[in-house]
Image: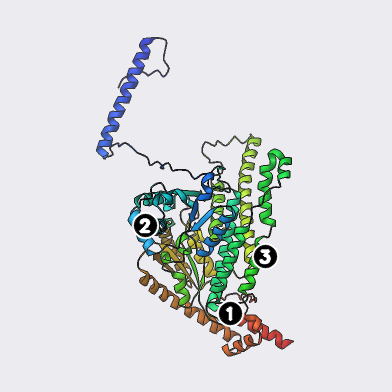
């Protein structure tokens, strides 16, 4: 080995610089040779990397807004109807694409990449299929490309949801709609993702409109599922639901976003934007534009006569976001099937998902406190700087906690306006506490720990006889939580839990598996009802006679308190009848 030292700095003597450089060059040369040898041996040949670049897309501009139709979809028709109204109220032309069916799934497979998760095939194929329908109706392809845009939620990893945007583009190109525009709003992007010259202004009015529509859609949906299995006159719930959804659609369409008075704006000068922003929030919190409309829906629902003594197993739906929401072939039309089989379906609100996203960001802030890229924690004695960092962190968390509280209270305002028939949102901190021992709550993607947590929550809180998890074929996070669910089930022996993998085929097999688990849930509900009659020394006929004498108890808004340890509505009703009978006897 050479004993010559390499001088890092050039010296005044040209000779020394020359020697230093030569040795350094030699070292680098030998290093490269050795690296190349090791790489050859290990078989890791260096290849040129070509990173994927998002193709540039023709923008959707403000000037095109009047002639352009916004397409959207992927939820239930109830959510979509209200989102439609909200978009029209904001001045957009909008259209919801129909609920995806099996032929949409096949189109997704035909035009998209292989190896995607099931919702990708359904939703991507559905858009392609819808555009093909427009073409069949005689609209030229170029006009479809120029006059329609699709907008959807976007996210970045870790599950395949991050790839949806690229999948839409690929399938559209393969189907001959190259250049068709797909607009994204980022789930984690906050309340303002707008560009004022953009065709779709994703500003606070947009997000408040969409959130209100989603929340009202959630609650209307849940109320209908809670009443339909008990209606005395078949079809009444659906008839009233249809009418009231049309009515609410008009309410959303006519709602004008709150605006700062022009004179006041001039007076406030540079502060007018902030004042308008705050005003919109205050109007959202204090205003009650939707309350009278929802109360009207409540009164219409209350005209449905229900038979509370029908013994029905309550089936809570969980699983992956899209599979548990859609009402079509994407989950084997599972909700219809369950109702036909005699169950009451407890649907999952989109609100839980929104709360989950806010909750996860708060957790992330807490976990990454002081660890942000490039952050250097000042020494202990720099108290002022440390306090500033602490204050900044607390401020961020406080803002999100406020958002959490506002969202929850707005949601519950809707539940209460619709008569309190739907459930309040499950608390995210409780879900985290329940789910974390089985599924790390920091593992993101899909529903994360929620799927496990909801299984425990709904089984343990007397809210459901059975939990049915709808898990799409090829879903990575769902596959992970499947493993954890075996541990959950072995810890909670009473639980009836069934995971069903949804795909474009296999409906009969899935239905027969659900039928088997439902058999157990039915027998659980029947035993519970029989035990309630026995504990109160009552017969079914006596209960029926009491209802006959108290017709107000057939109204959906008649309040039946929940009996601890009892899941089914009929069993709780028996306890209620017994206590009313005792009170009437005493008087
Ligand atoms: S959660 Fe599962 S099904 Fe949903 S997008 Fe992600 S990988 Fe696909």
| Quadrant of the image where one finds ligand 1 | bottom left
Mark carried by residue 292: 3
Numbered mark located on residue 306 in the image = 1
Q: CA distance from mark 2 to mark 3?
A: 42 Å
Tell me where residue 379 sits by quadrant: top right
- Mark 2 neighbour class, 10 Å CA radius: few under 14, some 14 to 19, many 20 or more: many
Query: Which of the two marks, 3 or 1, is nearer to us in this view?
Result: 3
Q: Earlier in the sequence, mark 2 or mark 3?
A: 2
Circle 1 SS class: loop
Q: Secondary structure at mark 3?
A: helix
Q: Is residue 320 in sight in this rendering? A: no
Q: Which is more toward the observer, 238 or 330?
A: 238
Residue at the location (63% across, 34% down)? 382
Question: Which circle marks residue 108 in the picture?
Answer: 2
Q: Give the quadrant of the N terminus.
A: top left
Q: In percent of the image, x 31 and y 36: which residue is there? A: 48
């Amino acid at each position: 080995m050479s004993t010559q030292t390499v001088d890092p700095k050039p010296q005044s003597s040209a000779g020394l610089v020359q020697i230093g450089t030569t040795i350094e060059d030699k070292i680098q040369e030998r290093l490269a040779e050795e690296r190349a040898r090791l790489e050859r041996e290990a078989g890791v040949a260096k290849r040129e990397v070509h990173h994927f670049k998002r193709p540039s897309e023709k923008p959707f501009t403000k000037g095109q807004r009047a002639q352009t139709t916004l397409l959207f979809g992927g939820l239930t028709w109830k959510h979509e109807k209200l989102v439609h109204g909200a978009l029209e109220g904001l001045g957009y032309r909008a259209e919801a694409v129909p609920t995806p069916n099996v032929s949409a799934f096949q189109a997704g497979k035909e035009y998209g990449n292989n190896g995607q998760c099931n919702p990708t095939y359904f939703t991507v194929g559905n858009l392609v299929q819808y555009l093909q329908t427009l073409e069949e109706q005689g609209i030229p392809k170029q006009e479809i490309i120029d006059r329609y845009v699709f907008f959807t939620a976007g996210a970045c990893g870790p599950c395949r949801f991050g790839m949806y945007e690229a999948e839409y583009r690929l399938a559209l190109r393969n189907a001959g709609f190259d250049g068709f525009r797909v607009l994204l709003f980022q789930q984690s992007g906050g309340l303002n993702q707008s560009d004022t010259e953009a065709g779709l202004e994703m500003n606070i009015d947009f997000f408040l409109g969409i959130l209100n529509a989603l929340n009202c859609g959630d609650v209307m949906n849940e109320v209908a599922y809670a009443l339909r299995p008990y209606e005395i006159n078949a079809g009444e719930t659906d008839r009233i639901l249809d009418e009231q959804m049309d009515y609410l659609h008009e309410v959303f369409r006519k709602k004008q976003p709150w605006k700062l008075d022009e004179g006041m704006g001039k007076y406030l000068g540079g502060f007018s934007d902030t004042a308008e922003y705050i005003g919109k929030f205050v109007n959202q919190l204090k205003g009650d534009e939707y309350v009278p409309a929802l109360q009207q829906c409540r009164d219409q629902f209350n005209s449905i006569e229900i038979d509370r003594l029908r013994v029905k197993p309550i089936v809570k739906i969980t699983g992956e976001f899209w599979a548990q929401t859609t009402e079509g072939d994407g989950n084997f039309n599972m909700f219809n099937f369950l109702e036909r089989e005699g169950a009451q379906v407890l649907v999952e609100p989109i609100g839980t998902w929104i709360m989950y996203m806010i909750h996860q960001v708060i957790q992330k802030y807490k976990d990454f406190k002081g660890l942000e890229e490039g952050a250097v924690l000042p020494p202990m004695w720099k108290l002022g700087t440390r306090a500033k960092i602490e204050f900044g962190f607390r401020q961020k968390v406080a803002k999100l906690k406020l958002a959490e509280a506002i969202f929850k209270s707005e949601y519950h305002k809707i539940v209460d306006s619709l008569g309190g028939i739907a459930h309040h949102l499950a608390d995210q901190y409780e879900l985290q506490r329940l789910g974390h021992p089985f599924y790390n709550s920091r593992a993101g993607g899909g529903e994360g720990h929620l799927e496990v947590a909801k299984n425990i929550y709904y089984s343990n809180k007397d809210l459901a006889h059975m939990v049915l998890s709808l898990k799409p074929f090829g879903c990575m996070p769902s596959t992970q939580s499947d493993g954890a669910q075996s541990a959950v089930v072995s810890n909670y022996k009473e639980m009836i839990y069934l995971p069903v993998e949804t795909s474009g085929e296999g409906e009969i097999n899935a239905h027969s598996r659900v039928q088997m688990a439902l058999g157990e849930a039915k027998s659980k509900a029947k035993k519970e009802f029989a035990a309630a009659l026995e504990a109160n020394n009552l017969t079914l006929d006596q209960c029926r006679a009491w209802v006959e004498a108290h017709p107000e108890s057939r109204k959906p808004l008649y309040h039946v308190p929940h009996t601890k340890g009892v899941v089914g509505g009929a069993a709780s009703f028996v306890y209620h009848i017994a206590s009313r009978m005792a009170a009437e006897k005493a008087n």
